Image: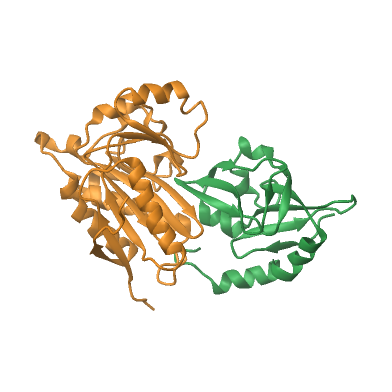
Amino acid sequence: MPHSRLVVQLIKCKKLVSYAYGQSLQSHYIQRLAIGRGSPTLLLLQFEPVYTCGLRRSSSIITSTDVDRLRSLGADFHETDRGGLLTFHGPGQLVAYPVLPLQHPQLRLALRTYISHLEQTLVDTCGEILGHTRIYSGIDTGKSVSYAGAWVDNQRKVAFMGIRYSRGITSHGVSINCSINMNWFDHIVPCGFDRRQITSLTDEIPDKKMMTVEEVIPIFIKHFQKIFNVELIESDCDYKQ
Amino acid sequence: MCQERYFTKKHEWIQLLDANKKSIEVRVGISDHAQRALGDVVYCELPSVGAKFKRDDTFATLESVKAVSDCYMPIDGEISDVNEKLKSEADLINKSPYENGWLIQAFINDKEKKNISSTLMTEKQYKQFLETNKEAGDH
């Protein structure tokens, strides 16, 4: 018996924001949802250049020397409590944070199902842009954890995932390399992979046509709504720093 | 000889260990349902021995396929031991959630010991709870 679709508010940040602002913004919506006063939310953002690491941050992954080196390149550095390893966020990369109550009666998703739906959203979005036969999902192809995301020609990762699930509410999320300057990825071992295994939508389109975040957003929204069976309604950002 | 397990709504289990000493000790882990819902666990962050937690506090975090999620204390307790094997073999949680994949041990007081059977679910009650709370995509 189909249930009516959950309404999720869509918040698009119009300008580049700092990573710190992005986390405060996300926390704002999480807290409101946690006390029963907010709405499930999908945040869409672009960050000023920042490198981030996840829960796993031993010295085999990143050292304080590494952090100094990355900061000297003009990027910020943040530790986070999401899954996944090292990555970079910056202009030209779409970041999406679904803040969803997975146990809500209109959702009722196990964590691994949520992850699978999110990966499918990435795969369908990138598939619509580059051609569905070119895009592979990391998890479904039976590989290990680090592979979660969307892969072009099963060789180069173009979309990434790193989730946090706490007290029934999801946070952090996904990113898609649209027209980002790929040189930023030269300075880390992104997601634990060889730099050559990371790419962007623009780099994969023949004759160097650019694919911007603004062009990717409506495609991402369409697939997100369909796969999660929710209704996205755009709202103004009501959080002031 | 081990006692029966009790379960929380958040899918943790708790089990009294042999009470032959002056202190009452329990073992805590996550259920088989929980490990299947998480997927392959790749990393586990456990508390320090001596850390004190109240019921419902986050005492550990688990990273599975691209997600980090929390484990919640079933009752008040003080950590007496953590499963060191999980540092190098986090997927023991998937392979053996009730035996080798246990998470922590804790000292509890008499009041909390009584709370286990009065506030938590028996294995049978937990199975019924799972039946009536099926999530979409559960297998």
Q: x%, y% of residue B21?
A: 89, 49
Camera-side residue of B50 and B123: B50
Position in image of residue B68 (x %, y %):
49, 47
Residue at screen point 60% across, 71% down: B129
The quadrant the N terminus of chain B occupies is bottom right
The way the protein has been coloured in the rendering is by chain
Q: Can residue A63 be seen in this view?
A: yes
Q: In this view, does A225 lie to the left or right of A192?
A: left
Q: Which residue lies furthest to the front in this view?
A: A241
The answer to whether B84 appears left or right of A163 in the picture is right
**Toward which corner of the image does residue B72 lie, by quadrant?**
bottom right
Q: Is residue A171 above or below residue A78?
A: below
Left or right: where does residue A197 sit relative to residue B12?
left
The percent coordinates of residue B73 (x first, y second) are 65, 56
The answer to whether B31 is drawn above or below residue A207 in the figure is below
Q: Which residue lies furthest to the bottom in this view?
A: A1
Residue A83, x across and y down, in percent: 45, 43
Q: Which color was chain B given?
A: green
Given residues A31 and A82, the one toward you in this image is A31
Counting every numbered tag in the picture gives 0
Residue located at (45% from left, 39% from top): A54
Can residue A101 be spotted in the picture?
Answer: no
**Colour that chain A carries in the picture:** orange
The residue nearer to you, when weighing A66 against A226, is A66
Q: In this view, does A82 lie to the left or right of B105?
A: left
Name which residue lies at 67% across and 40% down: B48
Q: Is residue B105 above or below residue A109?
A: above
